[in-house]
Amino acid sequence: MLRCDCLASPGDKLSAAWYIVLERKIPGLDHSVNGKAVAKASAQLDFFAKEKGLPLLMKFFSISPEELAGFAKDHRVSLEQPPPQQWFSADDGLKTVNGLIDGAGKHKLDARVIADLREFQTVLEAAKKHDVRWHLVVDF
């Protein structure tokens, strides 16, 4: 599965989805999220986050060195030393997600974007409760 948004351009017909990867499984939790509406509304969400002084959702993006190396090889890109995979606290992610949800009405966010953000919120609240770190991945 290809997991990188760095090469997509606005004119691409790709259907990207942003989703959460947890550092370890939480028993009984389905951590899957749709993430397509959030990806599609990324520019609007970035503007809103900047306005509120929140970290952008893509600040939480990371990819394993193995996946990045495979992506680079598949696309004939030279990659000498892939950066290490990063993990973030659920609390940090919740600050951004909760801030975006709180201002959804003011910024006229589409109901599908709000639904995706609420799915992120549910997973991140469980991750916080179980002290599990996370990162954001892009799939297209």
Image (tube, grey):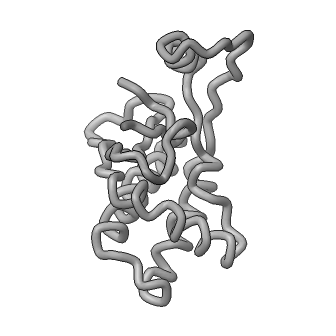
Residue 31: % across, % down = 33, 43
Q: Which is nearer the eye, 121 or 28? A: 121
Q: How many marks?
A: 0
Q: Quadrant of the C terminus?
A: top left
Q: Which residue is located at x 44 percent, y 36 percent?
A: 21
122 displayed left or right of 75: left
19 displayed left or right of 58: left
Residue 50 sits in quarter: bottom right
Q: Quadrant of the N terminus?
A: top left
Q: Which is nearer the eye, 5 or 48? A: 5
Report whether residue 89 is seen. Answer: yes
Q: Residue furthest bottom?
A: 106
Q: Is residue 106 above or below residue 30?
A: below
Q: Which is nearer the eye, 123 or 117? A: 117
Q: Is residue 131 above or below residue 49?
A: above
Q: Which is nearer the eye, 72 or 49? A: 72
Q: Is residue 18 above or below residue 57?
A: above
Residue 118: % across, % down = 36, 65
Residue 69: % across, % down = 57, 13
Residue 133: % across, % down = 55, 39
Report whether residue 134 is seen. Answer: no
Q: Which residue is located at x 46 percent, y 35 percent?
A: 22
Q: Which residue is located at x 48 percent, y 50 percent?
A: 129
Q: Which residue is located at x 73 percent, y 13 percent?
A: 81
